[in-house]
Every structure is written in structure tokens, then in C-alpha cells.
Amino acid sequence: MSFRKLGLGLAAATMLAGMALPAFAQDSVYVPLFTYRTGPFAGSGTPIADGMHDYLRMLNERDGGIGGVKLVLEECETGYDTKKGVECYESVKGKNPVVVNPWSTGITLPLIPRASVDKIPILSMAYGLSASARGDIFPWVFNPPATYWDGLSMIVKYIGEKEGGIDKLKGKKIGFLHLDASFGKEPIPLLQELSKELGFEVALYPVAAQDMQNQSSQWLSARRDRPDYMIMWGWGSMNGAAVKEAVRSGYPMDKFYSVWWPGEDDARSGGAGAKGFKMLNWHAVGTNFPAIQDIQKHVVDKGLSKAPKDKVGELLYNRGIYNSLLIAEGIAQAQKLSGKKAVTGEDVRRGMENIKLDPARLKELGLEGFTDQLALSCADHNGHRAAFMQEWDGTKWVKISNPIEPMTDRVKGQLDAAAKDYAEKNAGWPKRTEACDKAS
Amino acid sequence: MDILYKIFIEPFVFMGEAPDLLIQTLWEGLVSGVLYALIALGFVLIFKASGVFNFAQGIMVVFAALTLVGLYEKGVPAFLALILAALAMLVLAVVVERVVLRPLVNQPDIILFMATFGLTYFLIGFGELIFGGNPKEMITSALLLPQGTTELDMLGGMVRFQHLDIAAAVIASIMIGLLAVFFSKTRIGRALRAVADSHKAALSVGISLNQIWVIVWFAAGIVALVAGIMWGARSGVSFSLQIIALKALPVLILGGFTSIPGAIIGGLIIGVGEKIGEFYWGPLVGGGVETWLAYVIALLFLLYRPQGLFGEKIIERI
């Protein structure tokens, strides 16, 4: 082949590529999904990844996308590794993503300062930096429907009520079993503050990532310290191993609480002895919702999902659905506000500040009763919604409480101080310049 | 003074005040130690035969356990699945010998070590491709492993013995004993020791290096299968089990890379040492000392016996 022909070929290919790119941008919205289907955290990551993907894929299959534009979905495997997560971010940011879901507090933290520069909103759903709930300081970060600090305050409040009043926690001992990483340490400042305020003692039990499946020391220590209650902040294979070890060590399971991350498999691993294990949650399990039935019809039954059929509707799968519900609503609101079909990250940031998932909207989406309502705003990127307590009955989760509101009076001051502190410590932290929509 | 009291007096006072917890901690340490020893044994076998530190031993534990559980989930009866998992480890041994070791024979040890790195990542990917990344439950009852707990009132308190832990300690001890007899009393065992002493001398008397490597990798695979069953029964089968296998490193430093008794004693010292350290001294620094204490213990031993407790003293003419 002559150089002339080669040159012509290259020029033609470049022209074609150039023609194809705008078409891609006009007809679709790019939604990268950071997932981990491999490694020690895959047990939690896989069902969430399936739920996230399947809901958005269902919108593509059933409705042709959102507002007439297809969603281009692309997974990037992070392995729950911060370095790989940042690499994923760098690899997708040139493709105009409308939102990024890091699915790891460790990955979220380094992305927070980049978000405002790259104009890509970060959705860290119920994880990440609690203080990023402050929309005036973190306009590009969203962490609905509740922060880790809200979650911790709900568990402490629930335990307090069990004891006959929050003041009855005085003199009690609360053990805190946590992954020794950014995620697991996130609620510790609030726990220590609450312990001072309410007069309970705290015993910390860190679990290193390499010892997630080797927790006998932590549970031996718990036997030594005799905590009245145990609260777990675990992820991946740590959760199942903790339930097993708690059963092995004879810890009373009705005193063992967790934040919202264990799934059915984690509880099941403790066998019959795991009965009574409790955790927070804010959405339903099961498939008895038109939207989830549409997922089964349009995605799972057609072989377009990676999820085994019997896993559809399980807790972490539905958690993934909730995450994608927020993405979809952010995009829909962005389309409404901007009048554009192919919205950008900047539009979706605005859209997310205008999310209003009230009962009527949830019904319209085929998710009536799936979750409590949620409204975000320019100032509040979290919602600080209530969660409920559910208990493992040996085969399934059973809801055992009414909605538990976070202890806003105790958390808000801490959260505001932490947000201010973050902005001060990160020299040159930009003041919010993004305008607020009237509705938000 | 307060800190000195907390370091040197308080833990021992507590040991005396709650001897049941001391017994419990020692028991937990012994069980962990036996399992560490089992993993370390896999490393020792391969190192003895080929001078290669097999970085893939950890993932072999996961791979063996996943094969067993995966076959069972496909409907294969438990004991047939056990045999098939053992056969899978034989196939792996043959493939490793053919594809990795044979082409690299006479290469520097570091090249072979790096090859086991490659093997590790291959097995991770291959395992995830076949079995998926989700944790699985070990088929404890199908394998007729005992479950339940015996609670003994003793020394003014109560000590809990998990039947599974007792079984793990017994099975691991039998396994270690059998391997020790196999390698010291049988013809193949003597051939292995000859290979370990000198490849060239072994070749000169007609010992097949290739055959020995397959046997040794297969033996390490069987050890990995047993370790995978026992660890998996304790805490589930997932890819994070391979990280636990790295606990065998301080065991090897302590016991010596070439000694089977060293792996056993080293495993027990590390297992008991880290549990005692975490339980009695961990609270002084906010817990979490277990992750590094094993290495501190190993390094302290290294100061006095660089070759490990039972390792061969290497004297080289300069």
C-alpha cells in the first residue's frame, strides 16, 4: 500500500470518527458504572452492580432510555481499590459522563476535589464523606438519602429507646467493629462525640482488610470487654465473617447491629445462630413492584442481566436499583430544567438538586412503597431521611421498626463543623458559584 | 509509670484474674496456628523441591476450595466433588510443571518466583471467570465435618470449643504427620530430599526432576485443598482467603523455608503470639496489632537465627 493511499485511508477514518462523535453525543447520555465484581469485596459489589445496571438497562429496553435518549452504560471494575477507582475516573472523564458513582468511600474522597474542576457530579449514595451533604460547600457531591453519621445516630437512638430512653445509655459500653479503612472510620468522630454527650463507653475493634476473614481476635476482645451492644461498619467478606464469628463466640445476636450494608448471604453465613442480627435499611426487598417486574421482563428474562434470577429482589440488588433510580431522576430533572435531551454533567448536577421523589412520583415510576420520599435541594444534598431497623429471622429480613429519624440536633452541628473544617484544610477550596434553581 | 504498668503488669494480672479467657485465647491461637502451619507447609514443600517461593500458594487455597464448592453447587455429591477437586489440583500441578517450570529450568530463582506471581493472577482471573467473585459457603455438613460447640466451665469461667476447630486441628495434624512420614520414609520422599539438596546430583542418579515437581505441586495442592476447606468452614470461601495465606510468610521466616517441623512450630508460635498480643496488649494502641505483630515476632527471631528455627544453616566458601 502506498503512503498516499494510507494517508487517504487515515483521513477518511478520522472524518468518519469525527462524524460519529457528535451523533453519539446528541443521541445518548453516557453513564459509567464503577463496580467491583472481583476481589474480596465482590460479595457486596456484585449484586449492587447488577441492580444498578439492570434498572438503567430496563429503562433503555422499555422506554428507549430517559426522555427519548438512550443511556450508554459502561462498567469499570475498581476491585474496591482506590487507585483503580481513580484510574476508572480518569478513563471515563473524557467521555462526558453525566454522573460518577465511586461505590467506595476511599475512591470518593480523592474524587471530591476533582468533581468541581471536571464538572462531573459525584453520587456517593449513603456512603462517602458525611460532610459532603452540605450543598453550599460541596455543590458537586451528593450522598442521599442519609449520611453515615445519620446512620450511626439512628442506631444509637434505637438502642437508647430499647433501653428505655437515650439517657439510659449512660454507663453502657458500645463496641464498634469496623473495617480499618476510610469507610469504616468515617463515623468514629461522631461516635466519640456521642459517647461524651450521652455517657456511654466505646470500644473500637478495627478489622484490617487482610484479616476480614480472620476475626477471632476481635471477637475474643469483645468477650473480654463485654460490650452491651455491638455496632458493625463492615463491607465485603467482612460482614459474613463477622456474623459467623459473633455466632461462634456466643455474642447475643439481638445486641448486634449493623449499618445498611450486609446482604442476605452475609446473614445466612451465620446459620440458624444468626437470628436476631439487625441492620438499618431504607428500601424494600423483594420483587413486588412494577418497575422490578419490568426489570425481570425486559432484562433478566431476555438474558441481558448478569444477575442470577433468584438474586433479583435481594437486599443489595435492590440497593443498586435505588442508586440507579437517583441517577435516572437526576437525568430526568436535568432534561426538564435544561430543555435538552442529551444533558451534560453540569445539567445533571442541577437535576440532582431538584430530585423530588414523593409518593406520587414513586408510583409513576412503578416503585410505590419501595422507599420513603426524598427531596434534595441546593443546600441539602443528602435529605437526611429516616431508615428503619430490620432483623434476620433465619431466612429473610423482617422490618421491625417504624422509621427512625436521625438525631439531627446532635449530628447537624458536627456535620457543619466537619464541612467547614474540610474547606479550610483544603487551601483554595472554591466558594460555590453554581446558581441555585428557584425550585430547589 | 502508668504506661509501664499497662505494658508489664496489667496484662499478666488480667491473665491471672480471668484464666478462662487466657485458655480461650491460647486455644484460638493454636487453631489459627495449625491452619497457618498448613498453609506454610504448602510453601515449604515447593521450596524444598525447587528452591522456588511459590507466591501462588494462597490463591491455590482459594482455587481448591472454590472448585470443591463449585462442583457441589453443580450437583456433584460432596465426596465425589472432593476427589474431583483433588484431581483438579493434580491437573494444575501437571500444567504448572509443563507450562511454567519446565521452560524456565536453570533460570535464576527470581525468574521462577516472578512466574508464580503470574500464576497467581492467572488463577485469580480464571477462578473468577469460572466461579464468579461472590463468596460461597463451605459445604461443611455435606463433608460430615462436625458443627456445634462444647462449652466447658473451668477456672471460674467458661471456655468454648468449636467442634469444627477441633476437627481442623486434628485433620491438619494428621495431614502434617502423613506428609512428614511420606517425605522421610518413602522412596519418592527420599527423591524429593535429594532434589532439594542438589538438582544436578539428583539428575545424575536418575531422579526425574519433572516427575518430582509434579508430585510436589500436587502435594502442595492437596495441602491447599485441606487448608481451603478448614478456613472456608470457619469464615466462608472468598478471594480474600488468599490474603490470609500471606500470614504464612512470618511463619516461614520463623520456621525456616525448608523445614516441615519448622512450619508447624512457626505456625503455632505465630498463631498463639498474635492472638495473645492482640488480646492483652492490643488495647494499648487501639487494637489491630495482629496484622503486624506476626512480622515483629518473626523479625525478632531472625536477629538470632537468620536461617529460622529449623532452617539449614548455609555456610558458603568465599
Image: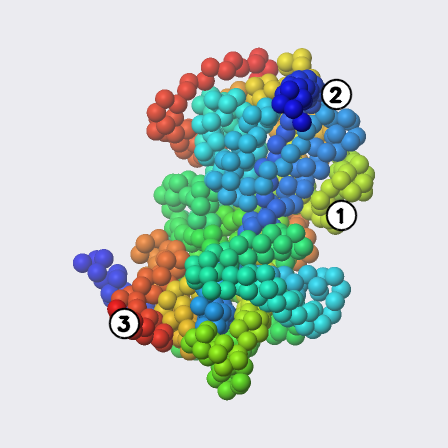
- In the picture, measured across the screen, residue A221 lies left or right of residue A233, that is left
Give me the C-alpha separation between circle 2 and circle 3. 80 Å
Q: Residue B317 carries which label?
A: 3
Q: Position of residue A285 (x, y in %)?
A: 69, 44
Q: Camera-side residue: B309 or B117?
A: B117
Label 1 packing within 10 angstroms: few (<14), some (14-19), many (20+): few
Q: Camera-side residue: B310 or B216?
A: B216
Q: Where is residue B72 in the image (x, y as percent from the top left)?
A: 71, 65
Looking at the image, which residue is at 68% across and 61% down? B70
- In the picture, measured across the screen, residue A197 lies left or right of residue B9, that is right
When the figure is inspected, residue B55 is found, relative to residue B306, above or below; the finding is above
Looking at the image, which residue is at 24% across and 65% down? B8
Q: Residue furthest front?
A: A2
Give me the C-alpha separation between circle 2 and circle 1. 29 Å
Q: Mark 1 points at which residue?
A: A309
Q: Which numbered disc, 2 or 1, marks the residue that appears first in the sequence? A: 2
Asked whether residue A166 is in view, the answer is no
Q: Do labels 3 and 1 share a chain?
A: no
Amino acid type, label 1 = Lys
Amino acid type, label 2 = Gly
Write down the chain letter for disc 2: A
